[in-house]
Image (tube, rainbow, N blue to C red):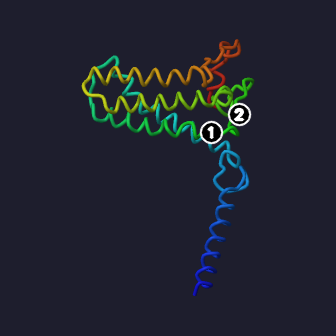
Amino acid sequence: MRRIVAHALFTVTGALTATAFAADATPGTGPGWTGVTNPKDVITARQELMEHIEELMEPIDTITVKDVTNREQLRISAEVISAMLLAVPHLFPPTTNRFDPKAEQPQTLALPGIWKNFGSFYQLAAAASTAAETMAEAKGDQQLRTASLGLRASCDACHTLYLRPYSPPKVLPSDINFDFDSALRKK
């Protein structure tokens, strides 16, 4: 009986060990290493996440200049943003450091400073998450306004350091002299 139990224990232990070794694959050789196997998809995922955060931020930003309405929805949005911001740093594996300052439309707007000082980036995301949580817990219109300013400041602090600044397109002489009539003329 002991032999059967020992054999079963050895078999189970061996299977668990083999599973653990398989799960502990080196980066890029196993499933789940999407930063290595699909970096463009990771970049797209984080861009989508940031766009949705910004959509949730729109009504939060407006309460600094307009009346506070729909307080509960503002708190829910802030709570969702808080959770989303906790995930943000995990969507920046080093393999997604693909900013090209010479490209007019780079693959990513995330600046290389993120990976040079990842600890700072991580802390800024955590601080922004905390600011969002503070807003989610705010009571009263003035507290909501104050918390919304804190949340926006947290976002801007990170973006100032780690997001390519917006540069409007340059107007060229060919733009000014473009012949719209001939381009739009029906054939």
Where residue 25 sits, quadrant-wise, is bottom right
Where residue 114 sits, quadrant-wise, is top right
Residue 17 point in image, percent of width and height:
66, 65
- Residue occupying image coordinates x 52% and y 21%: 157
Q: Residues within 10 Å of mark 1 (few under 14, many from 20)?
A: many
- Which residue is labeled 1 in the image? 43
Can you say whether 175 is above or below 52 in the image?
A: above
- Residue occupying image coordinates x 66% and y 22%: 182
Q: Secondary structure at mark 1?
A: helix
Q: Tell me which amino acid carries mark 2.
A: Arg
Residue at the farthest front position: 2
Residue 90 point in image, percent of width and height:
58, 40
- Residue occupying image coordinates x 24% and y 25%: 140
Residue 48 point in image, percent of width and height:
54, 38
Q: Secondary structure at mark 2?
A: loop
Decide: marks 1, 2 in contact (CB < 8 A)?
yes
Residue 59 point in image, percent of width and height:
37, 28
> Total marks drawn?
2
Q: Residues within 10 Å of mark 2 (few under 14, many from 20)?
A: some
146 or 26: nearer the eye?
26
Q: Tell me which amino acid carries mark 1.
A: Ile
Q: CA distance from mark 1 to mark 2?
A: 9 Å
Q: Quadrant of the C terminus?
A: top right
- Which residue is labeled 2 in the image? 98
Can you say whether 5 is above or below 88 in the image?
A: below
Where residue 6 sits, quadrant-wise, is bottom right
Can you say whether 88 is above or below 9 in the image?
A: above
Name which of mark 1 and mark 2 comes first in the sequence: 1
**Which numbered tag is attached to residue 66?**
none
